Image (spheres, rainbow, N blue to C red):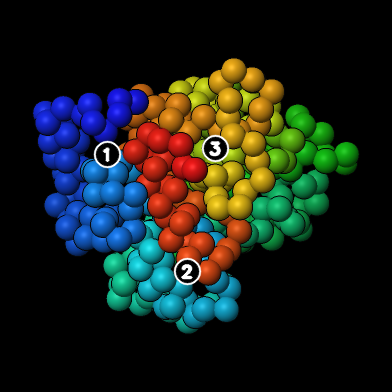
Amino acid sequence: MKSRKNISRRSFMHAAAGTAAAMGGTLLGTGAWRNAGANSASPLAAWAAGSLKKAACIGVLPKELSVLEKFKLARKVGFEGIEPNTIRRPEEVQEYKEASQSTGVKIHSIMNSDHWNYPLSDSDPEVVKKCIDGIKTSLQNAHELGAETVLLVPAVVTSEVRYIDAYKRSQQYVNELIPHARELKVVIAIENVGNRFLLSPLEFVRYIDEFNSPWVRAYFDVGNVVSNGFPQDWIRTIGKRLVKVHIKRFEPGADHPKFDPKDRRTQGIDWPEVRRALRDIGYDGWVSVEVRSGDESYLRDLSLRTDKIFAGENPE
């Protein structure tokens, strides 16, 4: 990416106009611009971000805080959105709704909670039923809270569950959930994780394409492919299927080596290239940080580092 000093006035104004349009004319009311001087690397970083939207997974925020306090802190340090886990109790759903409305911090997605303990790929129908019930609860959460997606880990391959069975079973049950997702107007977003499943970008997109439904799309985690691939390659292969993004391995105190283009053995992430790949496919949606929790100082640093990634820079 060009340095900030070399950004032309025309390019700058084009990026600014695109951002304002994508945000529906509400940019001045969000933490991304109003607090840019305090919470971003610089005001220019906020403009250079294009229309990427910055969010935090709920677990990143201090656990001892109330729901409302978490939303207020997220807003204070510059996050525009939050991604909660499955919410079980109606009163807690209402609590999240009120916190979002009072702070202006959007709930953009729900992370389904039951897919690890009760995977769709399990051979026991009772286990699968628990998973399906949890996904339906997550979809209902998303519908009631105005979130666009539910993150789903579709299967877990184990010594007892063969890869082919995980593939077939999970597709069967996701297909059965599509009408429910369509009715609620919530996308089921399949995430790449350490589940020994969908191990390449080609297989990942094939799995999604086989549903042949706009209600099943891709949730890409940048940090989850570093051990056996390059995030920018996955992003370009996923293309327009991409609906949400997780990022990690850039946070303050992370003990991962930096990406070195001269040494491909390193496990760091080439963040400028990741940002370039997102631009190449036209992605302008939510990017949620999924890292350890911390105090306000840590979260502010995390927010600043995310701004740098959005601007096409290394986060350090």
**Mark 2 or mark 1: whose residue is earlier in sequence:** 1
Q: Indicate which label's residue lies in the foreground, 1 or 3.
A: 1
Classify mark 1: residues with Cα within 10 Å, few (<14), some (14-19) or many (20+). many
The answer to whether the residues at label 2 and label 3 have Cβ atoms under 8 Å apart is: no
**Residue 94 vertical position relative to residue 247 in the rendered view, above or below:** below
Q: In the rendering, which numbered label is found on residue 303?
A: none
Say which of 258 and 57 sits in front: 258
* Residue 220 at least partly seen: yes
**Left or right of 36 in this view: 159:** right
Count of numbered badges drawn on the protein? 3
The extreme top residue here reads: 262
* Residue 84 at least partly seen: no
- Residue at 44%, 78% (x, y): give it: 69
Amino acid type at image mark 2: Glu
The location of residue 250, given as percent across then percent down, is 54, 45
Q: In the rendering, which numbered label is found on residue 48?
A: 1
Q: In the rendering, which numbered label is found on residue 296?
A: 2
The location of residue 302, given as percent across then percent down, is 47, 55
The answer to whether the residues at label 1 and label 3 have Cβ atoms under 8 Å apart is: no
- Residue at 34%, 38% (x, y): give it: 311
Amino acid type at image mark 1: Ala
Q: In the rendering, which numbered label is found on residue 222?
A: 3
Residue 75: quadrant of the picture: bottom left
**Left or right of 270 in this view: 228:** right
Amino acid type at image mark 3: Val
The extreme front residue here reads: 5
**Left or right of 133 in this view: 32:** left
**Mark 1 or mark 3: whose residue is earlier in sequence:** 1
Query: In 3D space, how far apart are the residues under numbered discs 2 and 1 (Cα atoms)?
Result: 25 Å
SS for dot 3: helix
The answer to whether the residues at label 2 and label 1 have Cβ atoms under 8 Å apart is: no
